[in-house]
Image: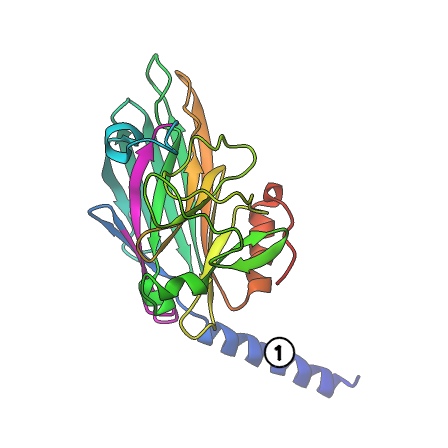
Amino acid sequence: MSGSLLRASWAWLLLCAVAGLAGAADPLAITWEKNTLTISGAHLSGGEITVNYLEAYCRNGSTDADWVKHTVVGHTTRLVEARDDKTLIRLEDAVSDGLRVTHEIRSTPDEVRFEITAHNPTTRRSEAHWAQPCIRLAKFTGADQQSYLAKSFVFLDGQLARMPTRDWATRARYTPGQVWCPTNVDRNDVNPRPLSPLVPSNGLIGCFSADEKQVFGTAFDPYQELFQGVIVCLHSDFRLGGLEAGETKKIKGRIYIAPDVEQLLSRYRADFPLHGQPAPR
């Protein structure tokens, strides 16, 4: 290649890089107020996703128990920090049994990252075995409680399975909804909604946007259950397991926005290599 042609090629690559940077999306904006985490962006389908963060801390023995009288462990949340550019939030939860949980939440143009630290400073075991981030997806899917089900998916037998999946459970203390429990979690310790007999291939649950040009996915590690809820919501509920006195645990989570399932899976596998290797759709 001649010198002039080489210089022209480098100039073209530089121009493309600059153009790409100029056209790159801004980070998703994250705000938190009154237990609601709001994720927004001009490039996000529907413009906004909200999360009840956190809906509840929960006791074990919950699958066939009264939600209010038995399962919910009370908590309060304090906003510790909210960066002006809306890319970082720090929260601190005081759980009624003495457990303390801190949350660092960061955003990128196509992701929200959760780094959670739970510590039990008391002299007794914590009652909190799992917790629920309830992610509301009506605007993203452009759907209501009935129609969003067909937009939603989990992975079964290594394949993407749209809801309602096969062997859809319909009986439970409370209906409707659907719960998927991984093999390492006691099936007596999950949400008191219909419990699927099927075991998910991995910890990823998600849905398609209204025009199906974006894919939402969420995962936490460790996770207690995947849950399709009773409003237009999806859950990957994270596992605490009842911390012993003085014990500390780390949990990580992700909310992904991807252009297709293959890219969603690629990012999920990189972040959660121990969750299995699901096959593409």
User: Is 230 located above or below residue 102 in the figure?
Assistant: below
Quadrant of the snapshot with the C terminus: bottom right
Residue extending furthest toward the front: 171
Q: Quadrant of residue 173?
A: top left
Q: What stretch of residues is rendered in magenta?
A: 37-60
Residue 198 image offset from top left, x and y in percent: 55, 45
Tell me what residue is drawn at x 35 percent, y 50 percent.
176
Q: Is residue 241 above or below residue 147?
A: above
In which image quadrant can residue 262 be found?
Answer: bottom right
**Residue plotted at (65% across, 49% down):** 277
Q: Residue at x 75, y 84 (%)?
A: 3
Quadrant of the image containing the N terminus: bottom right
Residue 279 position within the rendered picture, expressed as x and y whole percent measured from the top left: 65, 56
Please state the total of marks drawn on the protein image. 1
| Residue 109 visible in the snapshot | no
Q: Main secondary structure of the magenta part?
A: strand
Q: Label 1 is placed on what type of residue?
A: Leu
Nearer to me, 276 or 72 = 72
Left or right of residue 113, residue 13 in this image: right
Residue 41 screen position, x and y as percent: 34, 66
**Which residue position holds label 1?**
13
For the residue pair 189 and 139, the one nearer the viewer reads as: 189
- Single out the residue that lies furthest toward the right: 1
Q: Is residue 204 above or below residue 241?
A: below
- State whether residue 189 appears in this view: yes
Q: Secondary structure at mark 1?
A: helix
